[in-house]
Image (spheres, rainbow, N blue to C red):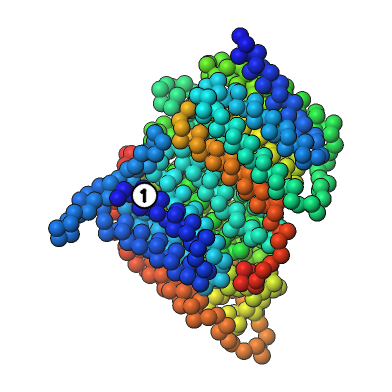
Amino acid sequence: MAADIISWLAVGLILATSTTILISRDWRVSLGSLAAQYISVFWLASSHLPFVMGSVKLIAGWMVVAALGMTRLGLTNLEEEEDTFWPRGRWFRVILTFMVLLVTAGSTTRIEAAIPGLGLPVIAGGLLLIGAGVVHLGVTSNLLRVTLGLLTMLAGFEIIYAAVESSILVTGFLAVANLGLGMVGSYLLVAGSTPLENGEEL
Amino acid sequence: MSAPLLWIAIPFFVGVLILFFLRERFSAFIGGSVAAILALIALIFPIDEALLLGSISLKISPSIQFFGRSFEFSAADGALLAIIYGLAALWFFGTEASGTANRFVSLGLMIVSLLTASIAVEPFLFAALLIEIAAMLVIPLLVPPYQKPGRGVVRFLIYQTFAMPFILFSGWMLAGVEASPGDLGTTTQAGTMLGLGFAFLFAVFPLYNWIPMLMDEASPYVAGFLLWALPTFTVIFALGFLDRYVWLRTSPQLSNAIQFAGVFMVASGGIFASLQRHIGRMMGYSAIAETGLLILIMGLRSSEIVNLTFLLLIPRGLALAVWALALSILKRNAYSLLFNEVQGLARSFPAAVTALIFAQLSMAGFPLLAGFPARLAVWQELAGQSLSMTMWVFIGMLGLLAAAIRSLAVFVMADEEKRWRVNESWVQVTMLGLGVIGLFILGMFPQILQPFMADLPSLFNRIGQ
């Protein structure tokens, strides 16, 4: 009973953090929300995985947040790019989040009926994250935000996949994939800010 | 010594060592030599068979356990490994001539080893994870540290990341389909998920828009390597699915859908290639058309799917390598690869232009060149099943041919006063020359590939039954 309540609180936290990542213009707030999001991911994944394997997801996620944060902190001359998509604005993104919530609410019980045993909070949390990640990728071309969108989408997938596959190797590879995504995001943020050292690189 | 250790771990660690400890001057030779040696070992030493050399008995064990799962190579994988590492050696030796940085050989070795791991991992659907990790390693190759990333790279990363969850989840659903194949709902869902996953991986229309963008932004040699490596291993991965799940092979709707996707890619790739004014983008669209041919082959209702696939894959690797090398030589001397920048370059870089045109013609299926025997075989099989599809494939090839003729016209369009000079280095001329000779040899004597291809159908022995 208590575990169920905490699971639904985790889903609530996922909704709050994914919305915050989508509407916030400050990268610090976005990364902080991503870090909080991984706590929910840890809790929901741990309902089907051993505690240690669930904690791998949390640690990998926080390492990614740290890497992205340190990289972004070092780029002091980077201006926040104005998205050129129409429509844009916070209310539009809130509406998008609401649509994701509606789809999640409609799909969760049907998926639970099709694949019993997953648990409603796990499905809801996973679908929310996948939807929020996809929506985020659709409304931004900023490198950091693209990375956050991909990480969010992957986190949602990992929650649901943890319920069907509990292999150590898969957990490890998914952690490597998350870390790799974070490092690639950091690399792409930094690329172009270092001058060309020698002509041979052309 | 185990096969996964030899063909996965060793090249990966050699790649790491080259990245951190070796100078650029030696990296091409070391990396190419390692790949060539691994290819030779795969050819000479059979896996899981004891070889007696005097009083010494050598055996390469086929598998290794890793965190509860295994990486396995069978005896039939030897030829496949020889092909993969042989072609990789061509790419690595070519960096000497292309002038690509040290990172290419080191990261290239790591990428090839990860992709090789993807064909060895059991259960095989975990390959999606390894392909994703390899795709991430490509990013530092595509985007040098001094260059701002373009939209093509970001889109490539997004699509590769999208592919992984679809394939992993479909793998789980396929297990349920096996248990109750008559359940149409589950079958449709599993097929859709799998199709979407491979659509992202193969860059099926309209998900291939990142390829021409990448040809604009990235080094042609690196982009060519990516366009060779990823589809090659993705095809092997896809053949594994067809081999494993009988309903995938026997479903007429699925094979029609696969054929349609393949034909669409061939036709659209060829038509778009013929309309390009950027020779790098032409290579991108030609690669798209070739990938379409590979997808089309997998949709054929034929017992020759595996033979046709590898008959196409091997010349494809050589043609792309020659084309990418020629492009990278030209790009170092032209501001961009647009027609107005490369006009008349045949008189300044005759070797590169000649090699480029022959590679382009090979990928268009021009007779006497490496691509022709495979395309002829595909047309023969396809004509027995659908004349309209054969016609569209022909239109696609015609588009590629038109692109090659336009390129040739632009390259030779120079002032009469301009003198002929060979500005390529002797290394570049040698490599390009060897590549072109290879294209002719494979075109005129395709039976040379027979020893490599004899064992390959046993890798997927349920396909074609």
Q: Residue at image x 48%, y 28%?
A: A165
Report the side of B401 relative to B276 (left or right): left
Q: Residue furthest left?
A: B55
Residue B391 visible in rendering? no
Q: Quadrant of residue B299?
A: top left
Write down the residue under mark 1. Answer: B5
Query: Between residues A61 and B135, which one lies in front from this camera angle?
Result: A61
Query: Between residues B263 and A144, which one lies in front from this camera angle?
Result: A144
On the image, the x and y values in percent for residue A119 come to 57, 17
Query: Between residues B394 and B2, which one lies in front from this camera angle?
Result: B2
Q: Quadrant of residue A10?
A: top right
Quadrant including the C terminus of chain B: top left
Q: Residue at image x 40%, y 22%?
A: B179
Q: Residue at image x 62%, y 49%?
A: A184
Looking at the picture, which amino acid does disc 1 mark? Leu
**Relative vertical location of residue A54 with respect to residue B364 in this rendering, above or below:** above
Residue B430 visible in rendering? yes
